Image (cartoon, helix red, strand yellow):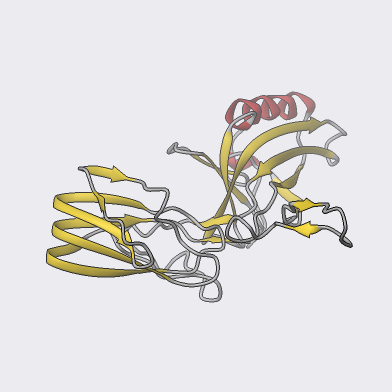
Amino acid sequence: MTKETYTPLDNAPYVLFEEDGGTVVYNSAEDWNLVLRSFEIEDANARRFAVEIPGRDGVLDLSDALGGVYYENRKIVLNFACVNFVTERFHLLASIMRNALDGKVMRLTFSGDLAYFWRGRAQVDAEWGGLNYSVITVTIDAEPHKYSVISSYEPWEWSPFNFVTGVITQASDIALTGGTVTVTLPVDPARGKPTLWLNTGSAKARLSSDQKWHTLKAGANLFPEIRMSATAEVQLLLNGTGSVGVEYRVGSL
């Protein structure tokens, strides 16, 4: 099973698979010689909380009570065609893909949307139907939001930046000299919680809407009270001396 056995069409779509937290990336076309025949991303369904109240019409909708609308997981189904695969090669590839993906939490990136990745648990199904009709299906039980490939803590790259939906972020080395520095956190539909990194020195942090300061320890810091908003930019205040990084990824439906 070599790359020479299949030459993808120019600009043919492909999918990148990466184990969450891992370093190995699989390219569906280059590594597995697969043709992405079709895919479906299930619509995001809002999670509703409704309570029936005696003596009133309808129901009391409490869906926004926890600070906004939340969503259920969504299903992503990828159908890959196996072109000119003899039965032995087909079953070998199916085994290789199950070992790489099945039951694992994977990051999934489409060639047509390289600025974002989806995250969810994968399942591989293989159906042999002959040389031109065999299909391998990968189903992802995915989180409702996709996330920016490049985080605010990583060096910025113009590729794969999306000029329509992308948000430029870079906050890995914020210098503190004793005063208070304000960092603007962008609108994030996923309402992510930034990780605060104390690189050097000593510092504390809080949101401008909160009066409680949180002392940072060396390394990574995560505070439930410090989170981004789905409707507006958030002001993060940093105070101290040394260097602080703010790490987050922006989500999108």
Residue 39 appears anywhere in the view: no
Relative to 182, residue 216 above or below: above
Looking at the image, residue 240 sits to the left or right of residue 81; the answer is left
Quadrant position of the C terminus in the picture = bottom right
- Residue 249 or residue 101, whichever sits in front: 249
Q: Quadrant of residue 82?
A: top right
- Residue 74, image x and y in percent? 71, 48
Residue at the image position 80 percent from the left and 38 percent from the top: 135
The location of residue 156, given as percent across then percent down, is 35, 64
Residue at position x 23%, y 48% in the image = 216
Query: Which of the image's four quarters has the N terminus?
Result: top right
x then y, percent, for residue 150: 42, 58
Count the labels in the image. 0
Res. 93 visible in picture: yes
Of residue 164 and residue 35, the one placed in the foreground of this image is 164
x, y percentage for residue 134? Answer: 82, 37
Residue that extends furthest to the front in the rendered view of this protein: 55
Tell me which residue sits at (41%, 53%) in the image: 225
- Asked where in the image residue 99 lies, by quadrant, the reply is top right
In the rendered structure, the answer to whether residue 42 lies left or right of residue 7 reads right
Image-based side of 234 in relation to 137, left or right: left
Residue nearest the viewer, comparing 234 with 54: 54
